[in-house]
Image (tube, grey):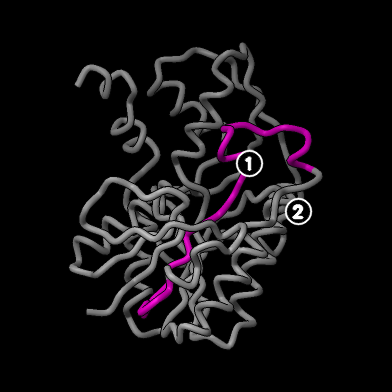
Amino acid sequence: MALTLVTGGTGHLGGDIVDRLVRAGHRVRVFARSPGARPDVEWASGDLATGAGLRAALHDVDTVINAATYSPIARRGGIRPIDFFRSPSAVDVEGTERLLAVSGEAQVRHFLHVSIVGLDEATLPYARVKLAGEWLVRASDLSWSVVRAMPFYYLLDRLLSGLSWLPVWPMPTARFNPVDTTDVANHVVACAFDGQRGVRAEIGGPEALDLVALARQYQDARRLHRKILPIDLSEAKARGMGFVVSQGVRGRLTWADWLRRNDPGTRSAA
């Protein structure tokens, strides 16, 4: 049976991709710094940032799904001034370059790279790093695909939860359509095995809303009462910050439904 390697397979999206692959009967190997506990996949220890373990991980691999990334904002759940000046590239650029090179040596048949919608006009350093990694894939001699996705609901939840201590929430009125990782995983896995290649349909959530509306839904779901201060942005500035509405495929799960499914009070009561 053909073997699929998933990088970033212990993250939110990567874990959902692995789940989808396993349910569909694929043989899966996960590349991670530390092996996980699940017994229904193979584990390969290593690090994209250094290249450690890559050759062993790619042995006998037919398809690579590269869902690995390193976003300081996502990891800490908030933005700091440094994020407007620089972002680490060891995973998303140098790591992608290493992965492509070793995949070529291993004669991988399909390299699918997960990227972000709206990178071409985005100006934040993390977006520029992601775009540089994506262009390495596009320039590769491998048989490749690129799937761009909108920001994920869990990240929006994390960012908004970090504002809960503030009495007033300044919120841009820019519209975008964040998406659930399970919807993205379904699309990514479909693209990995449908025989098509190149830049694939991007995926976003089913609703395009501004951050004011998204924040209000969040406050309602989390039983918070905070004043929301709308902030108007020019279209150019909004696009530079990544606030775009995706074209292509739309996920099914709405932000309101995601919030209900991921209510901390409900989970703790269960």
Which residue was labeled with disc 1? 72
Looking at the figure, which quarter contains the C terminus? top left
| Disc 2 packing (10 Å; few <14; some 14–19; many ≥20) | some
Image coordinates for residue 109, horizontal then vertical, percent: 41, 85
Which residue was labeled with disc 2? 123
- Under circle 2, the secondary element is loop
- Amino acid under disc 2: Thr
Image coordinates for residue 146, horizontal then vertical, percent: 51, 72
- Residue 123 left/right relative to 224: right
Residue at 47% across, 51% down: 33
Depth order, front residue of 47/168: 47
- Amino acid under disc 1: Pro
Image coordinates for residue 143, horizontal then vertical, percent: 49, 86
- How far apart marks 2 and 1 lie (CA) works out to 16 Å
Looking at the figure, which quarter contains the N terminus? bottom left
The answer to whether residue 206 of the structure is visible from this angle is: no
